[in-house]
Image: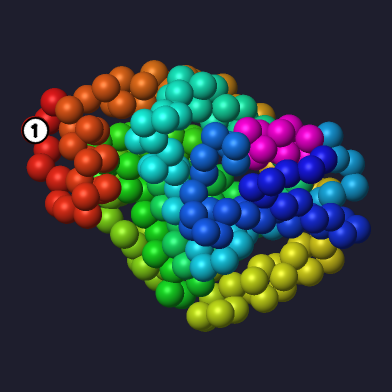
Amino acid sequence: MEFTTIKLEKLERRATLTLNRPASMNAMDTVMMEELAQCFEALQHETDIQILVIRGEGKVFSAGGDIKAMVDPNQPMDINAAMVCLTRIVKAYYQLPMIVIAAVHGASAGLGFSLALGADIVVACENSKLAMNFIGIGLIPDGGGHFFMKERVGNVKAKQIIWEGKVLSAREAQEVGLIDYVAPDGTVFAMADQLVGKILASPIAAMITTKKILHTQNLPILESILAMEAAGQSAMRKTTDHLEGIQAFVGKRTPVFSGK
């Protein structure tokens, strides 16, 4: 399977998925989202791959959704189609029959952070910046962001982090339980490789079976949240606050929200 915005490399029992739009900080446009959906759906049928590492090419893991694509007057993003594609991505991702490690460097924001949080293990470079920052442009988390945040930190803390939209350091994210390991600067991929080696030397079939049991039980909740995220995001895209947030982002100024 050939891709243009991601790379999938397989070696014996491991695979590496690289987000590959470095010139755009690996922001997810419609092409990348479709390719991620196809990739995860194909990986669901893998019988030899037991561990998957997700990483970003270039300076960052992922800046999130492609905001420039959202406001492109020549080819505006179809939010409803995007939500359908995101639902495909997350459902396939959550049901992968392998252990998933996210190796985060530089930055992981918005939709990119949702993707990282959906991994079984999250390793982040010490100098990375992590943010569930949809609120800054008047939107709600998507890509299963509500579900993955709730799984990691519980409802109350998830709400507070989402509402604040604060950019967290790796240490801060680890302290609240959003990520699992902090790697010294420049060593995140080496640490991920060490974890891969450790896991592959473990009774990994038992680990994957435990994952399947727990994820199968939670799948109906994820599906419900994805449906509500799709409806909520479509509604938020029509608000005055979202328009102001986008214009402020493009104009590099502080937004002035009205609650409408």
Q: Position of residue 22 (x, y in %)?
A: 55, 59
Residue 204: quarter of image: bottom right
- Judge left or right: residue 98 versus residue 245: right
* Magenta stretch prevailing secondary structure: helix
**From this viewpoint, which residue is outermost toward the front?**
74
Amino acid type assigned to the residue bearing label 1 in the image:
Ser
Q: Which residue is mark 1?
A: 258
Q: Position of residue 42 (x, y in %)?
A: 79, 35
Task: Answer few, some or many: residues within 10 Å of disc 1's Cα (few below 14, many 20 plus, some between 14 and 19).
Answer: few
Q: Is residue 240 visible?
A: yes
217 up-or-down from 97: above or below = above
Q: Position of residue 233 (x, y in %)?
A: 36, 26
The residue lying at 66 percent from left, 68 percent from top is 192
189 up-or-down from 62: above or below = below
- Judge left or right: residue 215 versus residue 155: right
Looking at the rendered structure, the secondary structure element under dot 1 is loop
The magenta segment is 34-44
The residue lying at 46 percent from left, 75 percent from top is 126
| Label total for image | 1
